[in-house]
Amino acid sequence: MNIGKTQIILGFMITCLLASPAAVAGADWNMFHENAQHTGYIDQAADFTPTVWYFSTQGAITSSPAILNKIAYFGSEDGHVYAVNLEDGTKLWDYKTDGAIISSPAISGDYLYIGSTDGYLYAQDIKNGNVKWKYKTGNSIESSPLVYNDTIYVGSNDGRIYAIDISNGTKKWEYNTGNAVKSSPVISGDTLLVGSDDSKIYALDIATGNKTWEYTTGDKIESSPAVMNDVVYVGSDDGKAYAINITDGTLVWNYDMGKPVASSPTIDTNDNSLFIGADNGKVLCLDTRNGEEKWNYTASGAVKSTPAIFDNKIVFGSSGGAVYIVNKYNGNEEWTYNPGYGVINYAIESSPAVYGNMIYIGAGDGSFYALNNDKMNGPTSVYAYYLGGAAIIIIALLIVVRAIRNRKQKEE
């Protein structure tokens, strides 16, 4: 298993500290988080053998995975795009860009589309990662692309929203907002909906890029919108979750969550429930019809991750370093997984993907984790191996010290 540079250095530091005298088949995911409701779930292939594992990269993983034919595709802040076998965590291929990958990939047909902080949108062959074309924007791309018919829609930190021809990477149109666009777009009918750091959510015509309406919140919008029944739902750094009428851009309701909301909403269409997190660690279930709170759950750190729905549960990560699985009807905790060890924890801001009974999620330690929900477990923490190695070194040192002491006593 490939071990990231950061983990190796950290493991060496732990070893030195402890050894010192003082211490002695799924479907094609065509947008961010699988669909406009952000359910983040696809059915598992019948011949799939679930196994817990982790795959390590050289940088933090905030990119959310896309899954196709038992393969997970995701990016890392080490600048690579990875294709990893879901059954055993082996790497099939990787491709190095000239920037960090924060954007989440979209898959259409035989190609994957993803942005990089080098400013390019890449079109890559899913079989080997070879680049078919790339399109240069004016700044970093942290927004996750949306593929719709023959067009890719994506935001850039240059403040623009782009419509790119899927076949050759040429620009169809662009729309200039007042600030960086990190939010990922969704489409409802003929309308593209996306947030901007200028505090506005925009409704644009998908064919021309002409603005239909805009709605201004109290702070930047990095949250990615979700839609249901002609209403768009989105979070803002002003601490509120918003429901806005898609037809005319009027406010349906808002809910004050108390802290910035970078998490994107997930909608359970069967239960009129919306799930969303905030920087105060709260995850709330709100009624999509009126914004009333159904329940809330408090995690160990900020929740920037977008929840995924499966069975009667939701799953999400937190900046406190844990993955949480809670009951979607009452918010009761089912189980948690923390890949850290003791006080060693890294933020989990990647949004999970659920493939049958398996949960896949990236973490700030650079690892991509496969968890088994049925067995309620995940792989043994890599830090446990470091601490185990440190313990072996300590025991060996104690044996050597004791041997030296015994020899000196005999000589006296």
Image (spheres, rainbow, N blue to C red):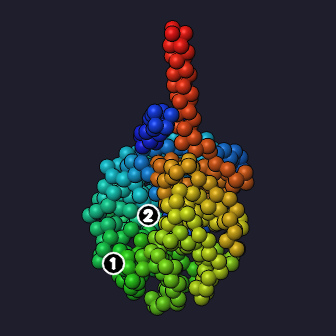
Q: Nearer the viewer, residue 355 or 61?
A: 61
Does residue 134 lie above or below 258 as drawn? above
| Residue 2 pos. (x, y %) | 49, 37
The residue depicted at 69 percent of the width and 69 percent of the height is 332
The residue depicted at 59 percent of the width and 53 percent of the height is 338
Name which residue type carries label 2: Ser
- Measure the C-alpha gap from mark 2 to mark 1: 18 Å
Q: Is 293 situated left or right of 280 in this image?
A: right
Residue at the extreme left of the image, as rendered: 138
Going from N to C along the chain, the mark reached first, 2 or 1, is 2
Does residue 169 lie above or below 386 as drawn? below
- Label 2: which residue? 144
- Residue 198 is marked as 1
Residue at the extreme front of the image, as rendered: 412
* Callout 1 secondary element: loop
* Callout 2 secondary element: loop
Does residue 316 lie above or below 211 as drawn? above
Q: Is 270 situated left or right of 107 in this image?
A: right
Residue 52 visible here: yes
Disc 2 crowd rating (10 Å Cα; few below 14, some 14-19, many 20+) is: many
Q: Nearer the viewer, residue 175 or 389?
A: 389
| Residue 228 pos. (x, y %) | 57, 80
| Residue 274 pos. (x, y %) | 60, 77
Disc 1 crowd rating (10 Å Cα; few below 14, some 14-19, many 20+) is: some
Residue 272 visible here: no
Q: Is 52 situated left or right of 108 in this image?
A: right
Name which residue type carries label 1: Asp
Does residue 27 lie above or below 245 as drawn? above
Residue at the extreme top of the image, as rendered: 411
Q: Nearer the viewer, mark 2 or mark 1?
A: 1
The residue depicted at 70 percent of the width and 62 percent of the height is 334
